[in-house]
């Protein structure tokens, strides 16, 4: 294996890291149900639960695009309970894993053009879209962790990859 190959942050590593975090958050919210309703922003992300729904809803919709499926309308995502939202997350993750484990190299280079809810019309390769899903996930979970700590929920684990169980 070349140094470049060893230094590349691969999808399987990111899948392991983010999937482990999803499961830890699920268990943490079961122990801290009041955290689900902590205020966060406005609109569909008004609460922590709304942010989690956003994370998983975006992953589902983008995984569907990657798989050339019909994209679920945002309004059709009606999960309201914590369990329903995490079930949606598992469904979305399954579709993302399916794409990442079956897509041919040429498929990753294919450019999709689509309308987003907030950024208008976007064109990007499937490789860029898949990569962005991980960054989107990690960024929003970092915001969730920070807002929860600011609201007295400081009993979390370290969220850093360096301190995770991921082997590299």
Image (cartoon, helix red, strand yellow):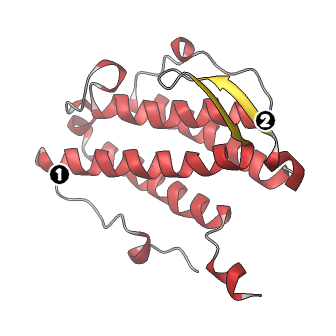
Nearest to the observer: residue 77 or residue 45: 45
Q: Nearer the viewer, mark 2 or mark 1?
A: 2
Q: How far across and how far down the image is residue 55, in percent?
A: 47, 37
Nearest to the observer: residue 16 or residue 28: 16
Upstream in sequence: badge 2 or badge 1: 2
Q: Is residue 129 left or right of residue 21?
A: right
Q: How far across and how far down the image is residue 69, in percent?
A: 78, 26
Count of residue discs: 2
Is residue 47 placed above or below 78 in the rendered structure?
Answer: below
Q: Which residue shows up at 47% across the image and 23% down it?
A: 118
In which quarter of the view is residue 81 placed?
A: top left
Residue 149: which numbered mark, if any?
1
Residue 92: which numbered mark, if any?
none
Q: Is residue 83 visible?
A: no
Q: Is residue 54 left or right of residue 113?
A: left
Is residue 88 placed above or below 133 in the rendered structure?
Answer: above
Nearest to the observer: residue 9 or residue 120: 120
Q: Which residue shows up at 12% across the image and 44% down it?
A: 151
Q: Which residue shows up at 66% across the image and 48% down it?
A: 128
Location of mark 2 (residue): 67
């Amino acid at each position: 294996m070349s140094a470049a190959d060893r230094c590349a942050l691969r999808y399987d590593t990111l899948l392991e890291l983010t999937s482990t975090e999803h499961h830890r958050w699920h268990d943490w919210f079961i122990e801290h149900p009041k955290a689900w309703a902590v205020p966060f922003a406005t609109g569909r992300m008004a609460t922590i639960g709304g942010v989690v729904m956003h994370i998983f809803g975006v992953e589902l919709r983008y995984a569907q695009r990657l798989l050339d499926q019909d994209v679920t309308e945002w309004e059709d995502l009606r999960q309201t309970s914590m369990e329903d939202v995490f079930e949606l997350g598992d469904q979305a993750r399954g579709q993302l894993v399916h794409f990442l484990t079956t897509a041919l190299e040429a498929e990753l280079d294919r450019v999709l053009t689509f309308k987003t809810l907030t950024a208008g019309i976007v064109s990007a390769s499937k490789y860029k879209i898949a990569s962005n899903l991980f960054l989107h996930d990690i960024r929003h979970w970092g915001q969730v962790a920070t807002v929860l700590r600011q609201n007295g929920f400081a009993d979390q684990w370290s969220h850093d990859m360096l301190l995770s169980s991921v082997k590299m």
